[in-house]
Amino acid sequence: MSPSSQTRPIEISPIKIRPIEPRDDAVVAAVIRAVMPEFGADGPGFAIHDAEVDGMSAAYAQPRCAYFVVERDGVVVGGGGIAPLQNAEPDVCELRKMYFLPEARGIGAGKAMMQRCLDAARALGFSRCYLETLTGMDGAQALYQRSGFTALRAPMGGTGHFSCDRFFIREL
């Protein structure tokens, strides 16, 4: 390997984060249904079974909700959003359905999506952001902690995701 090839930057195609549109619904559902089983999250009590999975654009068009997709080379490779946390104080939102295909991991897409979602949460008047995940999603949990989330001992609100076993919150 020549010295110039060792110092040459690796080029990674840029990502684009934009609000979800109806044309994205099928591919976002496919991403969720591909990623969740990868981490053993396809049984009862996981978000993969939520009714909104097949109609994410409509679900997140509701008040105080936002969902974004990540595109790489014009292809949707992930997404994430926020919505009010059910059965909780009105200042608490939930980071929801943030999943990325393998080609979107390790390139800064998670950090960029997290920032976009937290900015949207602040703009929508939330002061705290909550999320649920599960043991084994180590990369995601590292991102959450780097993003200022701290672990909770028990769940908040009423997401219906009784199979999740890790809970985090952060101030906005």
Image (spheres, rainbow, N blue to C red):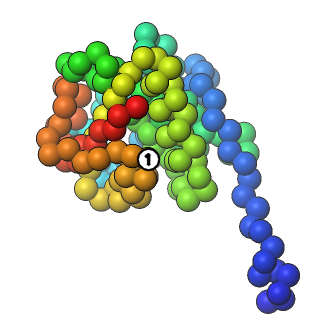
Write the residue at 49% across / 40% down: 114
Write the residue at 53% across / 38% down: 115
Residue 71's quadrant in the figure? top right
* Frontmost residue, 10 versus 147: 147
Q: Is residue 115 above or below residue 53?
A: below
Left or right: 105 with respect to 37? right
Residue 121's quadrant in the figure? top left
Coordinates of residue 52 in the picture (x, y in percent): 38, 23
Write the residue at 20% across / 44% down: 152
Residue extending furthest toward the top: 63
Left or right: 8 with respect to 165? right
Coordinates of residue 30 in the picture (x, y in percent): 49, 38
* Frontmost residue, 142 versus 97: 142
Q: Alpha-carbon neighbours of circle 1 within 10 Å: few (<14), some, or many (≥20)?
A: some
Provide the residue designation for mark 1: 147
Quadrant holding the N terminus:
bottom right
Residue extending furthest toward the bottom: 1
Left or right: 120 with respect to 19? left
Q: What amino acid is found at the position of numbered circle 1 in the picture?
A: Ser
Residue extending furthest toward the left: 154
* Frontmost residue, 154 versus 50: 154
Q: Is residue 95 visible?
A: yes
Coordinates of residue 32 in the picture (x, y in percent): 43, 40
Q: Is residue 79 visible?
A: no
